[in-house]
Image (spheres, grey):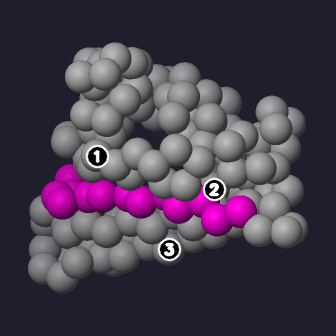
């Protein structure tokens, strides 16, 4: 079972700080993404949605538990899936690059399918889902920025 990779991008004229503020605020994700709801299961050692925090996102019948594994203010947010989908080793790195025309949001994910032969299906489905996330984030950052 090979590693599957997803790479989606969007650009917004909002500053990187406005985009990052949305990423670190799990409660905002259902506003700008297809996710249904958010819950903070456990705060990070520094409180709230800090490094190590476990966040729960629900969409329909799917409940994903994710841990924040890397935070670089205004530049990067990374999370790892703890449970939810039939995939393993899932990690997403969301990088923000601010330039003269705004902020580029680069959302990269990798994982392995738990069931042999399903990696491509999960990759195609998640690519569409994550593109909707990154597009919604870019658009909403303009409103909030």
On screen, residue 140 versus residue 69, left or right, reads: right
Q: Secondary structure at mark 3?
A: strand
In front of the other: 94 or 116 = 94
In front of the other: 48 or 58 = 48
Q: Is residue 35 above or below residue 39?
A: below
- Using the rendered image of the protein, determine whether residue 121 is visible from the camera's viewpoint: no
Cα–Cα gap, marks 3 and 1: 19 Å
Point 61% across, 28% down: residue: 28
Q: Which residue is mark 3?
A: 7
Tell which circle, 2 or 3, labels the residue nearer the N-terminal end: 3
Point 52% across, 44% down: residue: 73
Residue 117 position in % (x across, y down)? 20, 77
Q: Secondary structure at mark 1?
A: strand
Q: Is residue 8 magenta?
A: no
Q: Which residue is mark 2?
A: 134
Point 59% across, 48% down: residue: 74
Cα–Cα gap, marks 1 and 2: 19 Å
Tell which circle, 1 or 2, labels the residue nearer the N-terminal end: 1
Residue 42 position in % (x across, y down)? 26, 18
Q: Which residue is mark 1?
A: 69
Q: Is residue 91 magenta?
A: yes
Residue 85 position in % (x across, y down)? 26, 48
Q: Are marks 3 and 1 in contact (CB under 8 Å)?
A: no
């Amino acid at each position: 079972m090979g590693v599957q990779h997803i790479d989606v991008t969007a650009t917004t004229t909002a500053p990187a700080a406005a985009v990052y503020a949305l990423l670190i605020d799990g409660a905002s994700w259902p506003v700008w993404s297809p996710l249904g709801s958010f819950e903070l299961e456990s705060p990070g050692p520094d409180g709230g949605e800090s490094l190590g925090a476990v966040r729960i996102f629900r969409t329909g019948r799917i409940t994903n538990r994710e841990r924040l594994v890397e935070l670089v203010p205004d530049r990067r947010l990374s999370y790892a899936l703890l449970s939810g989908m039939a995939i393993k080793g899932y990690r997403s790195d969301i990088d923000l690059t601010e330039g003269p025309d705004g902020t580029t949001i680069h959302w990269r994910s990798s994982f392995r399918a738990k069931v042999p032969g399903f990696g491509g299906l999960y990759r195609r489905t998640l690519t569409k889902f994550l593109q909707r996330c990154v597009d919604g984030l870019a658009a909403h950052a303009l409103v909030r920025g």
